[in-house]
Amino acid sequence: MTKFIEEARVVGQRILNATTKQIDLIAPRIAAEAVPGQFVNVQVSNRTAPLLRRPLGIACVDKKYGAISLIYRIVGDATKILADVCSGDVLSIVGPLGHGFDLNAKHPLLVGGGTGLAPLWYLAQSMVDGGIRPDVLMGGRTADDLFWKDMYLDLVERMGLTTDDGSLGTPGTVMAELPLMLRRLHYDCVYVCGPVPMMKAVSAAVLEKGIKCQVSLEKYMGCGLGACLSCSCQGVGRRLKVCQDGPVFWAEEVVEW
Ligand SMILES: Cc1cc2nc3c(=O)[nH]c(=O)nc-3n(C[C@H](O)[C@H](O)[C@H](O)COP(=O)(O)OP(=O)(O)OC[C@H]3O[C@@H](n4cnc5c(N)ncnc54)[C@H](O)[C@@H]3O)c2cc1C
Ligand code: FES
């Protein structure tokens, strides 16, 4: 698959909650090629630190305007610098990287937590473009973490919400809702992206029902291009490079998360 280095012009940044922002970039070559589940590697500064580019999932694509959007949580040096970038600034980005989601489901359920809901957003948009409205189940610690519900509203058929503190939706993790949804509704594929414990629990429950399941893994990355092995994890009978073989895998392919 073709990858590009683009000098992407920032056309907007907006605050989504206290720790999360959306940045919109003009990157026509990446926008033209990107499929849901792929990511870009972003250089946030021309200085020596942070030295490495940072991987961020592609959250939205506007092919007509050659624009992509990234949604990121501010957690460390690179994302703090990114949060201060302004409209008109230029960022070097490499992409689209990795393999995306399987798009053949007829009755899909998307399950996400935290910034895992970013790549699932582009997946939901693509499914709707293809004439399929997915269901979504999203979990957060508090109601404030579920600002995503407004973004998904027009895209999905049914929406399940859970919060750890019970401030919105069903109290507990997504596992408080998932068994009921799997029992009542007949999904042919479940797509999961979020914290590792969530992906493990969800994929185990989904596979037990004999339903197909895809997971999107996040590992520390160096090159993002398959050369350094820093992102490797154990798959069935072989090491997997998350940047190149993934980040999306069939759940049963992954042995070590
Ligand atoms: C394929 C892929 C897609 C990603 N997509 C998104 C996205 O859409 N939105 C988003 O907010 N983040 C995403 N991430 C995670 C993002 O790359 C990191 O949060 C970012 O690199 C942190 O950089 P930093 O310098 O700000 O923080 P650092 O100082 O590098 O790290 C700060 C904290 O974040 C943790 N952390 C850093 N990188 C990772 C990682 N790869 N996996 C797990 N924990 C990590 C560290 O343990 C540390 O506690 C993705 C990661 C991968 C591999
Ligand atoms: S990040 Fe270098 S091989 Fe994956």
Image: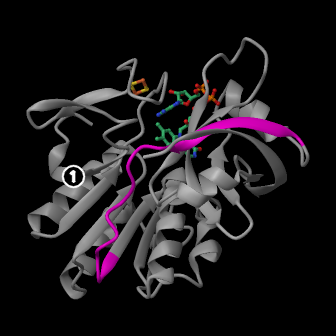
Which residue is denoted by mark 1 in the rendering?
A: 251
Q: Is residue 235 visible?
A: yes
* Left or right of 200, for residue 155: right
What amino acid is found at the position of numbered circle 1 in the picture? Ala
Relative height, residue 113 to residue 44 (above, below): below
Residue 180 position within the rendered picture, expressed as x and y whole percent measured from the top left: 25, 79
Residue 147 position within the rendered picture, expressed as x and y whole percent measured from the top left: 64, 66
**Residue visible at 17% across and 45% down?**
253
Residue 60 position within the rendered picture, expressed as x and y whole percent measured from the top left: 61, 63
Q: State which quadrant residue 15 falls in.
A: bottom right
Q: Quadrant of ligand 1?
A: top right
Residue 90 among those drawn in magenta: yes
The 10 Å Cα crowd at callout 1, few under 14, some 14 to 19, many 20 or more, is many
Relative height, residue 97 to residue 68 (above, below): above
Q: State which quadrant residue 153 falls in.
A: bottom right
* Left or right of 28, for residue 248: left
* Left or right of 95, for residue 134: left
Which span of residues is magenta-colored?
89-108
